[in-house]
């Protein structure tokens, strides 16, 4: 390293402490990157890669970006999952002895962004920590931009903790005490538990941390440690910590959330086309974020839901009140993130003016709600702190339209500070004298084109064109600068006034900055008040959004019951209905309970609406359990504790699983976790394997749900033989997606009716897809032959016996054992596993998964 120049040595010493980041190294007006950072950054940011002499044998790779436009480049790196360490010059180059002293002032990571321009307005930016405390898992999530902190703990498997963490859609993960690989595409940092301050949570949250168990404390401490290392400052706005139990909410695994398209679509991961897109009629950014949180975590507490529904009903029924509330909300800026920036110290004067304007709209909003006649809205409003003292303070301190920069003056209102007013007067009087000087000199010289000007290099000057130089009285001016068509002059008196003006302006700008920092610091003392106000306004915003959508689309209030029923009259898929717009949506009924209509077995062709019907029911349950009205003529719904879905086909590339394996894992998860209060949606189970395997799996799953779980289940299938289960299994009911043949064409009616489908229409669907006519005709010939041949035994004549299945497997294993000398290593391993398998501890789903894994091993062998 000694062969490099002192500056490059300084760079390398700093870079050593930040090996996993792009080091933005300040050099004058640029941030420079060197060595491998430069090569990678030039590729990621599409900027020119150059070289610099640094004392070594070869030029050092280098690239750079202007400091004033660095934010855009940093944002691009963050979007791609990278970290950026910002290294600033921390001493004046004029005063430096040798190399200018530099320090990393902040490490910016995907999960620690604070700047509004890098963040989506209506989406939280979560940093999530996972902590393993000897088998119990802690999960902590914080959004630094808003100050929110949520924490919970879970007993058991790591997969459950990871699934809980992924519900936050984290931008970054931190893990501690976690051995082994963590399969995720989210940027990940692993922390050594020994380097984390065990008392950090107590120092940050005080008495609010007293109820946290060990896994929770470990997770929060990991977050606070990571934030401290990257931000290098205290975060006073992070004072609210919310402990929760995952069972307080309707639980959905990652598969189910994706399949139901709650916040983004499966196809292109966009908000448009999701339930969030439909319901988002919020007026504020913080309301939009709260709406997303409510959708991702529906409630299971009936009294809380009834309170929300009461408020929605009142706002829906009072159009004038709702319009006034929306108008007031429209005047409120993002209080949560404004508070975060104020506390963090990067809020500018315009941010504080936005805060003032927001607070000035609160009294009217509060008055509207207090006088609404709604107990729920009255309670929300009565707890709203108007923060009138903060608004008045900001009104007195700051001008109405300050500049973006806080270093150029023009921030503080006249009358706020007496000394600042004196400096303003001195500057103003000096400029008045100079303005008068121009007229005085024109009269004294007779040169009407003479003018007085100013630039940052030469200061104030008197400019005379070349044509008028002869008219200047001798000795009146001192020559300062020669131009092509003019000469510039000064006078002793002008220089004296210039010195006074510039001194006053320099002091003025510095004093304004100091006063602004004081104002910002004073407001920062009231961050908890602002956060409480923001939370109440956000809740009001979500409730009015529900009321607005419900009124515009004709939704009804769901009746929440405890009888285990799910009865919907003329229900509609909320998103499909909205997308269809003017086209008539075909509404469908559903009647389910936990006795004689527990499992609906749905048959019918592809494209007939089976999957839409299933999703529709789940979405209406979600809407009811976030406190929103539902698209139906009437709905009587029992609260569900969990929703499981197995809809659609997709490989898990990250997990390395095939489509069929994903199907089996999702189904297994439902069978393991579901209760009698759950809702299960299973679409064409078994289609990823052979017909007999698939049918056997499907029937086994139905039997297991009916006999062992008792959950309300929607089960669609193309195995028409399964419809016989309605005769042998209590609670299984056949329904079908109706369609008709008209003129040789297939017409989908999208109507779900009682009974089973009378035939399959796969070849008709192939025709709709415009398959070649030759293929269609040949398919009809083959189908005719199959229909004249043997058929499967009726489903229900003989239910699957797991013992029989394993008996066959054991016999096969014995035969293999007799010829062990001819077995491959893979086969020997499978036989050994089969011998060790405890059938009494093996569920049907586990058995099928094991068989599938063995089959895959044999294929590879």
Image (cartoon, rainbow, N blue to C red):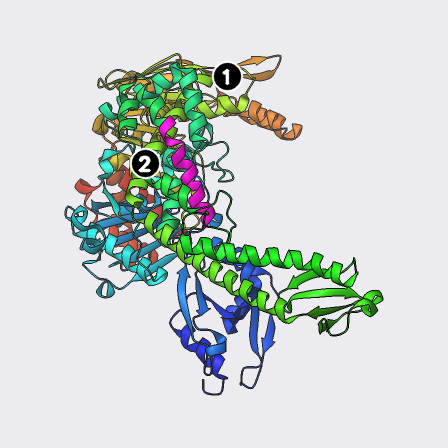
Residue 308 visible from this viewpoint: yes
The image quarter containing residue 550 is top left
Q: Nearer the viewer, residue 382 or 836?
A: 382
Tell me the residue at 45%/59% (across/down).
82
Q: Position of residue 486 (x, y in %)?
A: 78, 67
**With 671 as the anchor, is 486 left or right in this view?**
right
- Vertical comparison of 25 with 168: above or below: below
The image quarter containing residue 482 is bottom right
- Vertical comparison of 103 with 230: above or below: below
On residue 585, the disc is 1
Q: Nearer the viewer, residue 54 or 245?
A: 54
Label whose residue precedes the other's in the sequence (1 or 2) = 2
Marks counted in the figure total: 2
Tell me the residue at 33%/28% (across/down).
626
**With 845 as the anchor, is 52 left or right in this view?**
right
Residue assigned mark 2: 533
Mark 1: secondary structure:
loop
From the image, give the main secondary structure of the stretch colored magenta. Answer: helix
Residue 309 visible from this viewpoint: no
Task: Please state the extent of the stretch shown in magenta in the rendering.
Answer: 348-364
Position of the C terminus, as image quadrant, is bottom left
Mark 1 → mark 2, Cα distance in angstroms:
41 Å
Q: Position of residue 508 (x, y in %)?
A: 48, 59
Q: Position of residue 357 (x, y in %)?
A: 43, 37
Q: Residues within 10 Å of mark 2 (few under 14, many from 20)?
A: many
Eye-nearest disc, 1 or 2: 2
């Amino acid at each position: 390293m000694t062969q490099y120049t002192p500056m490059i040595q300084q760079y390398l010493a700093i870079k050593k402490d930040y090996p996993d980041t792009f080091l933005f190294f300040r050099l004058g007006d640029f941030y420079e990157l060197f060595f491998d950072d430069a090569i990678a950054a030039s590729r990621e940011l599409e900027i020119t890669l150059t070289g610099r002499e640094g004392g070594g044998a070869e030029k050092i790779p280098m690239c750079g970006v202007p400091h004033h436009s660095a934010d855009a480049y940093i944002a691009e790196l963050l979007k791609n999952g990278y970290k950026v360490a910002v290294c600033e010059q921390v001493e004046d180059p004029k005063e430096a002895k040798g190399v200018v002293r530099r320090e990393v002032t902040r490490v910016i990571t995907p999960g620690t962004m604070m700047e509004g321009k890098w963040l989506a307005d209506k989406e939280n930016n979560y940093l999530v920590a996972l902590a393993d405390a000897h088998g119990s898992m802690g999960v902590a999530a914080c959004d630094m931009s808003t100050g929110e902190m949520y924490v919970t703990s879970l007993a058991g498997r790591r997969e459950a903790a990871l699934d809980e963490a992924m519900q936050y859609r984290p931008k970054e993960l931190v893990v501690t005490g976690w051995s082994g690989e963590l399969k995720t595409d989210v940027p990940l940092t692993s922390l050594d538990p020994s380097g984390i301050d065990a008392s950090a949570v107590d120092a940050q949250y005080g008495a609010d941390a007293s109820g946290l168990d060990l896994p929770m404390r470990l997770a929060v401490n990991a977050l606070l440690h990571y934030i401290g290392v990257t931000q290098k400052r205290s975060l006073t706005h992070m004072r609210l910590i919310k402990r929760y139990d995952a069972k307080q909410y309707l639980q959905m695994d990652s598969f189910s959330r994706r399949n139901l398209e709650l916040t983004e679509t499966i196809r292109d991961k966009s908000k448009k086309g999701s339930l969030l897109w439909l319901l988002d009629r919020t007026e504020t950014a913080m309301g939009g974020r709260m709406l997303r949180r409510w959708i991702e975590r529906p409630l299971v507490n009936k009294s809380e839901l009834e309170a929300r529904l009461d408020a929605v009903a009142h706002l829906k029924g009072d159009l004038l009140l709702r319009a006034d509330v929306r108008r007031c909300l429209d005047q409120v800026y993002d209080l949560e993130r404004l508070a975060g920036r104020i506390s963090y110290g990067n809020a500018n004067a315009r941010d504080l003016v936005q805060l003032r304007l927001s607070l000035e709209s609160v009294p009217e909003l509060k008055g509207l709600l207090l006088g609404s006649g709604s107990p729920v809205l009255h309670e929300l409003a009565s707890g709203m702190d108007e923060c009138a003292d903060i608004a008045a303070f900001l009104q007195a301190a700051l001008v109405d339209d300050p500049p973006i920069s806080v270093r150029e003056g023009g921030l503080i209102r006249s009358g706020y500070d007496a000394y600042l007013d004196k400096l303003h007067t001195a500057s103003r009087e000096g400029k008045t004298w100079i303005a008068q000087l121009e007229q005085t000199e024109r009269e004294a010289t007779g040169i009407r084109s003479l003018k007085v000007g100013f630039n940052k290099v030469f200061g104030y000057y008197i400019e005379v064109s070349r044509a008028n130089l002869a008219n200047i009285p001798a000795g009146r001016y001192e020559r300062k600068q020669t131009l092509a068509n003019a000469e510039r002059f000064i006078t002793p008196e002008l220089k004296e006034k210039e010195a006074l003006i510039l001194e006053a302006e320099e002091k003025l700008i510095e004093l304004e900055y100091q006063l602004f920092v004081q104002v910002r610091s004073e407001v920062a003392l009231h961050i908890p008040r602002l956060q409480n106000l923001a939370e109440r306004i956000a809740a009001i915003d979500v409730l009015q959004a529900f009321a607005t959508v419900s009124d515009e689309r004709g939704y009804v209030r769901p009746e929440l019951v405890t009888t285990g029923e799910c009865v919907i009259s003329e229900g509609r898929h909320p998103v499909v209905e909205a997308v269809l717009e003017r086209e008539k949506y075909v509404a469908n009924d559903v009647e389910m309970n936990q006795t004689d209509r527990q499992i609906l077995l749905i048959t019918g062709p592809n494209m007939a609406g089976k999957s839409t019907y299933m999703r529709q029911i789940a979405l209406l349950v979600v809407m009811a359990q976030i406190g929103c009205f539902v698209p139906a003529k009437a709905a009587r719904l029992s609260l569900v504790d969990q929703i499981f879905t197995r809809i659609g086909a997709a490989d898990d590339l990250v997990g390395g699983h095939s489509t069929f394996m994903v199907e089996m894992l999702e189904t297994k998860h439902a069978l393991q976790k579901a209760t009698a209060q759950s809702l299960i949606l299973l679409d064409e189970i078994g289609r990823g394997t052979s017909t007999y395997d698939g049918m056997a799996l499907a029937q086994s799953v139905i039997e297991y749900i009916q006999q062992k779980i008792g959950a309300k289940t929607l089960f669609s299938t193309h195995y028409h033989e399964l419809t016989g289960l309605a005769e042998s299994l209590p609670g299984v009911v056949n329904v079908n997606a109706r369609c008709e043949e008209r003129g040789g064409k297939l017409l989908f009616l999208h109507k779900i009716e009682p009974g089973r489908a009378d035939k399959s229409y796969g070849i008709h669907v192939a025709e709709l897809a415009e398959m070649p006519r030759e293929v269609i005709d040949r398919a009809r010939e083959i189908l005719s032959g199959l229909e004249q041949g043997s058929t499967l035994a009726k489903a229900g004549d003989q239910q699957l016996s797991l013992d029989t299945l394993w008996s066959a497997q054991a016999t096969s294993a014995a035969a293999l054992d007799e010829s062990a000398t001819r077995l491959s290593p893979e086969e020997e391993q499978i036989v050994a596993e089969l011998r060790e398998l405890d059938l009494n501890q093996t569920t049907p789903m586990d058995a099928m998964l094991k068989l599938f894994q063995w089959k895959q091993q044999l294929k590879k062998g």
